[in-house]
Image: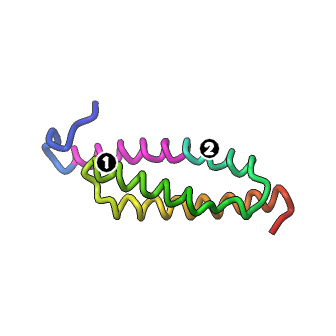
Amino acid sequence: MAKSPAECQTKADIRTEIDRLDTELVILLARRFGYVRRMAELKTSPDEALVPARVEEVLARVAERATDLGLDPGLARSLWTTLIDWNIEYEREAIAQRTGGA
């Protein structure tokens, strides 16, 4: 049973909850990546991997949601920037391999 931060009485309690959340985050990231993989299958050119307006839309939405939840929006933007950059590179490589493009 998950404990809220206030319910944690020991450092071990907190570590257990962080480990539980890390597992949930990895599961969610793997699910998200399934959509990235599918997007790479649908795109026809490596140039399609980067859509600047879409990147900014996602980053703005993540920062706003982070603010609403009391998370530093700069941290959220930084994490998502890393995630998005990795996904863009993955898409470029996957599309190039599939289509023979550079």
Q: Amino acid at mark 1?
A: Ile
Q: Quadrant of residue 100?
A: bottom right
> Is 27 left, or right, of 65 in this rendering?
right
Question: Quick one: 55 or 8, which is closer to the camera?
Answer: 55
**Circles 1 and 2: CB atoms closer than 8 Å:** no
| Quadrant location, the C terminus | bottom right
Q: Which residues are magenta?
A: 12-30
Residue matched to label 2: 34
Look at discs 1 and 2 and give the one toward the viewer: 2
Residue 68 rendering spot, x and y as whole percentages? 28, 48
- 9 to 72, vertically: above or below: above
- 37 to 45, vertically: above or below: above
Residue 20 in the magenta stretch? The answer is yes
Query: Which structural element holds mark 1?
Result: helix
Residue 89 in the magenta stretch? The answer is no
Marks 1 and 2 sit apart, C-alpha to C-alpha, by 24 Å
Residue 19 rendering spot, x and y as whole percentages? 35, 47
Residue 87 rendering spot, x and y as whole percentages? 60, 58
> Is 4 left, or right, of 101 in this rendering?
left
Residue matched to label 1: 18
Residue 61 rendering spot, x and y as whole percentages? 42, 51
Residue at the image point whose x is 41% and y is 52% from the top: 62
- 8 to 97, vertically: above or below: above
Residue at the image point whose x is 23% and y is 36% from the top: 3
Question: Quick one: 82 or 4, which is closer to the camera?
Answer: 82
Q: Quadrant of residue 1?
A: top left
Question: Quick one: 45 or 3, which is closer to the camera?
Answer: 45
